[in-house]
Image: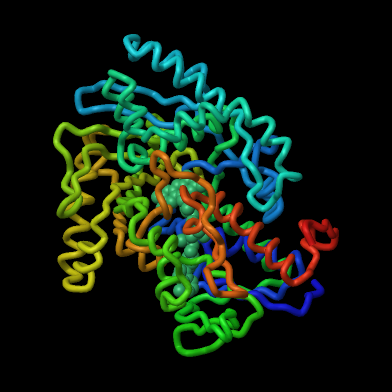
Amino acid sequence: MATNGKKIVIIGGGIAGLCTAVYALKCGYEVEILEMHDMTGGLAMSWSRAGYTFETCLHWLVGSNPNGDMHSLWQEVCDIDRLTFINPKEFARIENDNGERLSMYTNVELLESELLNHAPADAAAIRDFTRSVRTLGKFRMLDPSGGLADNWLNLLRDIPVFPLLGKLSKMSGADYGNRFADPLLRAFFSSGDVGKLSAIAMVLSLGWMNIGNAGYCIGGSQALIRLIEEKIRALGGCIRFKSKAERILVENHAAVGVQIAGGEIIKADWVISAADGRSTIFGMLGGKYIDHAIQDIYEKRERFASYIQVSLGVARDLHDQPHALTRILNSPIKVDPGTEAAFVGFRFFHFDPTFAPAGKTAVTCMLPTRNFEYWDELRHRDIRLYRDEKQRVADAVIGVLEKIIPGVRAAIEVIDVSTPATVARYTGNWQGSMEGWLVCPGQSFRPFPNTLPGLRKFMMVGQWVMPGGGLPSGLMTSKPAIKAICRHDRVPFHLHAGQPELVGV
Ligand SMILES: Cc1cc2nc3c(=O)[nH]c(=O)nc-3n(C[C@H](O)[C@H](O)[C@H](O)COP(=O)(O)OP(=O)(O)OC[C@H]3O[C@@H](n4cnc5c(N)ncnc54)[C@H](O)[C@@H]3O)c2cc1C
């Protein structure tokens, strides 16, 4: 492709860095992505062990439905229609040690009848909940890169939804769960960070699932990443692996390049960081370009927890299990000092044939923890004890699984445990956070500014500038960043390489 003579260096090859690269390449920029790992994806990751693939990220992708919201945005960065999406009938099953069980269906009619059947005393709250799921399914996302002219139709369509969004934005998931007397329903809304998040997050996600616009793609998150990477290569972009950015070079308060580990300097007209926000602002830029608002965010704002992931390769067909199962325990599991798991969530990947040989099943279990220091310090201090601790947690998880599927222990042929230290090592995210900033009641999902005060030719994209995170945060922060750069450089913003579509030049 003909370039416009300007170069952008992007730090980080997670979803945000990759989406940014595609938009930049389409506008004629020379693009070099610096990725510290040996593959792209960041948190959108899976890994293979002895014939099994263990997914860490993808539960649902907003924009999976060809007729749904955000699908056309994904089409701008990759050929998303080549992915095969499935929409599970049962999003999650919740059960407890006493044998009680509840199915959270994706179809709202099924969901309503299941909940009414299970907890008739909660009928009024259940009907209010399913009405909200139906209503929020109609919510149209606004294009954060567009102005009023691009968004007015969606804004008009959203007007009837605003009062409900306003009401839910003031409640946490746990507050929402408290509207139900039934303990399983309460647990669904209040477990882990879901309980801290604004209630919008879960109800809106169920709204998208109900209209089939939050599916799972076969191959998991890496299937999506591979498509975007393919697009970057087709457009002539360059991805440099094992290239950790250490310093963003600044001259006259403008970013001019990046120094990577080993000392090499890569010059550029623009630097975009798609990496962890804290290490970008306070590490690579030495904390020189901040104001009170930024300081406040990084000192006070709450982040999503990190997690231990126990992944199991089970030499058994587990099709009789749901896609996802949360087991509420009578006796909590000790995860680490200060963290107990009162519930354990399993995912049975029988629905993805690429993840295990025929007749076998990849199973994962995520245990949230905020005790990053413990795992990181232990790994550095005593690697044998670190491994023993991982084994201890794995044994506890397998003990729970054995209660759910008697005899399963004997069929487990692969055990893999990752910790918050693993997440931080492989993605650079602060304390191994799984999704960036939490959006608590009263806080907004609106993106933070993508520039830093006093610094020119620099932008940030990704989950650290879009509270709530998620794969769409990569897509939705990359387009406005490249649009702004194009506007500054007086370069036409092209949505389709070779077919100029001028926006805001
Ligand atoms: C367990 C889990 C479940 C999730 N489920 C979902 C889901 O179902 N749906 C959904 O939409 N989202 C989900 N998410 C969230 C989603 O994965 C993230 O929000 C998203 O992938 C973040 O993308 P990012 O590009 O902003 O950041 P990251 O993925 O963190 O990418 C940052 C990249 O920068 C690289 N990097 C960092 N520092 C440097 C440096 N100094 N030099 C060079 N490279 C560097 C890292 O290696 C990484 O590749 C989930 C996340 C987790 C962990």
Residue occupying the point 56% across, 74% down: 455
The residue positioned 16% from the left and 51% from the top of the image is 338
Residue 460 pos. (x, y %)? 55, 65
Q: Is residue 349 above or below residue 321?
A: below
> Does residue 417 lie above or below 108 as drawn?
below
**Residue at 56% over, 76% down:** 240
Query: Is 286 in front, or is 85?
Result: 286
Looking at the image, which is closer to me, 160 or 427? 160
- Residue, x 66% and y 49% (percent of image)? 74
x then y, percent, for residue 273: 53, 69
Q: x and y percent of residue 104 in the render?
A: 42, 26
- Residue 502 sits in which quadrant? bottom right
**Residue 483 visible in the picture:** yes
Report x, y in % for residue 118: 34, 14
* Quadrant position of the N terminus in the picture: bottom right
In this figure, what is the number of numbered marks?
0
Q: Quadrant of the C terminus?
A: bottom right
